[in-house]
Every structure is written in C-alpha cells, then in structure tokens.
Image (tube, rainbow, N blue to C red):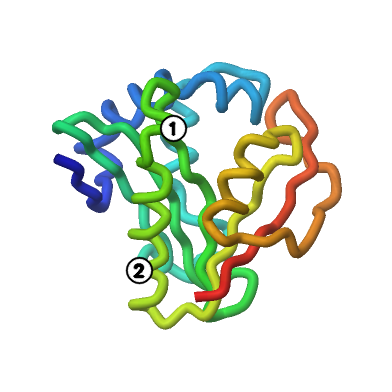
C-alpha cells in the first residue's frame, strides 16, 4: 500500500535522514558531500521565497510503511500563484518502480487544488536521467540558470514548467 502524507520535522526526521542515506548518490551529485543531519534540516526549512509555513509542503511517500520518497512543494514562485517542486527524491532502490509518476500526479493535484496555473521544477543539467523523467511527466525546459555553487559542486539548473 502506498500513502502520501505531510511530513513532520520532528516525528519524521529519522525516516527522512534514512531516505537521504538511501539516496546518497543524488546528495553527492548535488553537493559533492554525503547526507547529514544538516541535509534533513535544509529539507525541512521553508522555501526562501515562501511567505509563511502554509506556503510550503513537505511530503512523504510511504510504501509498506517505509518512507521511499520525499518532495518539497512550495507556492508563490516564480509567480505569486505558481507552485514549485524544490525537491523530489526517491530512494535509489525504489527508482524506476513508478513512484515518481505517482508522486508527481499527487503533487499536481495539490497544486491544482490551490489553483496554481503552473507547476515548476529546477533540474540539474548534470542529471540527464532526471531531465528525461520530468520531460516524460509533461514538463518543458523554459529557462537555463547561471552556474550556482551547491556545496562543493557548481551546477547549471534548468527551470522546467508544466501547465496545470
């Protein structure tokens, strides 16, 4: 059974940390570092553009009671009514099992319920598999960002958009 629910920064911190450990390949790709408690704290921090806690949702996808994926959904970027996926992370051993598609459908439903006209995501250019995933979910590249330092790595990110 699969369940998607809001995550609590205290009650779910250990499960989120365990998920980051199971997805350490992505954390290394993004930052050049391994997962840490700071990684968990960063995930639970509000989006920098969020007006308040109600503008950010931290979601978890549970399969058989185990946290297999997390998502960070925020509202108000790039435009006031838009929704933005700050992170969608799936445990390495659970990728290519349809969880990403299921999670994106849920996120799109949440964004539609908030009357967001568009759903955005930023994808690392160094992650072509992720670019292909998002394109398969109906997203198109709309903006190439400047190089940005992320931990020990520098990345170019593509902003991708899907009309809702």
The residue at the point 57 percent across, 58 percent down is 48
User: Is 4 positioned to the left or the right of 105 in the image?
Assistant: left
Given residues 26 and 137, the one toward you in this image is 137
Q: Quadrant of the N terminus?
A: top left
- CA–CA distance between discs 2 and 1? 22 Å
The residue at the point 69 percent across, 36 percent down is 128
CA neighbours of label 2 inside 10 A, class few (<14), some (14 to 19), many (20+): some
Q: Position of residue 39 (x, y in %)?
A: 49, 30
Residue of label 2: 109
User: Is 29 positioned to the left or the right of 74 in the image?
Assistant: right
Q: Check the image and report above or below for 71 versus 12.
A: below
Residue 44, quarter of picture: top left
Q: Position of residue 33 (x, y in %)?
A: 61, 18
Given residues 151 and 100, the one toward you in this image is 100
Q: Check the image and report above or below for 15 versus 71.
A: above
Residue of label 1: 96
The residue at the point 56 percent across, 79 percent down is 80
- Please tell me which of labels 2 and 1 falls first in the chain: 1
Which is closer to the viewer, label 2 or label 1?
A: 1
User: Is 114 positioned to the left or the right of 160 in the image?
Assistant: left
Residue 155, quarter of picture: top right
For label 1, the SS is: loop
């Amino acid at each position: 059974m699969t369940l998607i629910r809001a995550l609590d920064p205290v009650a779910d911190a250990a499960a989120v940390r365990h998920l980051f450990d199971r997805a350490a390949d992505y954390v290394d790709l993004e930052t050049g570092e391994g997962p840490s408690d700071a990684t968990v704290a960063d995930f639970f921090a509000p989006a920098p553009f969020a007006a308040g806690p109600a503008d950010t949702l931290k979601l978890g996808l549970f399969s058989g009671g185990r946290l297999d994926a997390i998502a960070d959904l925020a509202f108000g970027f790039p435009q006031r009514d838009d929704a933005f996926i700050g992170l969608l992370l799936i445990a390495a051993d659970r990728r290519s099992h349809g969880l990403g598609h299921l999670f994106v459908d849920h996120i799109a439903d949440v964004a539609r319920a908030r009357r967001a006209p568009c759903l955005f995501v930023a994808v690392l250019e160094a992650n072509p598999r992720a670019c292909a995933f998002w394109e398969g979910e109906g997203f198109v590249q709309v903006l190439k960002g400047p190089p940005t330092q992320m931990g020990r790595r520098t990345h170019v990110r593509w902003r991708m958009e899907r009309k809702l």
